[in-house]
Amino acid sequence: MEITFDDVATSAQGMSSLYIELRNDNNKGEIWLRNLSFEGFDTPLELPKLEGKWSTKTSGFDFQLMECDKAGTRVYCKFLVTKEDSDGFLRLSYDQVAAQDDTGSSVNAANLLIGNKSSYNLNYYLIQGVQTPLELTFENIPSSATMLTNLTMVFSSDQRKDQIVLQQLPLN
């Protein structure tokens, strides 16, 4: 059997996870492969751990804030999120992610992007130990704003609901 994947980043060195489900009328089988290097099976895939400007660990997740950038009236906050204790889902909804700026404006997220999925509501399966990009987009932030005074992100996982709160985030 040969499996081909399209649109793989040219910088990719391997796959953090590959799940294959095999079925026929009476049987079902599953294959999970992890940390597959494109160099071959003899070379383990080394997954780098990047550190953010701010971090917190809660409910089995590690959130690393990499940056908050402003372009006109849009703000993009980029995180790396890792599921630490086991594989599992991260659920986010735009109306549960909010930012307040230093001009007094308050907005909910206009878009959420995690891994390669973008939507107002996300249900994304994370692989244990793999840092996955998460980007929050906020629109209609006044051009005079220089900082997010408060960013709140309510999320849920397989069994819990939790939140993170960041304060005094300068906008690049």
Image (spheres, helix red, strand yellow):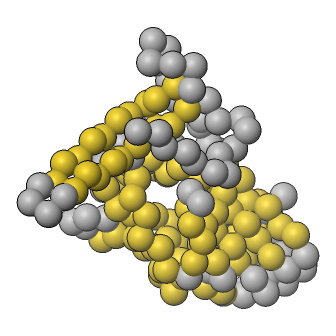
In the picture as drawn, the residue positioned furthest to the left comes out as: 26
In the rendered image, the vertical position of residue 103 relative to residue 76, given as above or below: below
30 relative position to 129: left or right: left
In this view of the protein, which residue sits in the foreground, 111 or 100? 111
Q: Residue at the location (62% across, 43% down)? A: 52
146 relative position to 52: left or right: right
In the rendered image, the vertical position of residue 26 relative to residue 56, given as above or below: below
The quarter of the rendered structure image containing the N terminus is top left
Q: Residue at the location (19% across, 48% down)? A: 29
Q: Residue at the location (47% across, 73% down)? A: 122
Q: Residue at the location (28% across, 52% down)? A: 21
In the rendered image, the vertical position of residue 106 relative to residue 157, given as above or below: below
**Res 28 visible:** yes
The quarter of the rendered structure image containing the C terminus is bottom right
How many numbered markers are drawn? 0
Res. 23 image quadrant: bottom left
In the picture as drawn, the residue positioned furthest to the top comes out as: 42
Residue 5 in the image: state x and y as whole percent: 57, 48
In this view of the protein, which residue sits in the foreground, 111 or 19? 19
In the rendered image, the vertical position of residue 167 relative to residue 107, given as above or below: above
Residue 51 in the image: state x and y as whole percent: 59, 37
**Res 64 visible:** no
Residue 25 in the image: state x and y as whole percent: 14, 63
Residue 42 in the image: state x and y as whole percent: 45, 12
In this view of the protein, which residue sits in the foreground, 165 or 14? 14
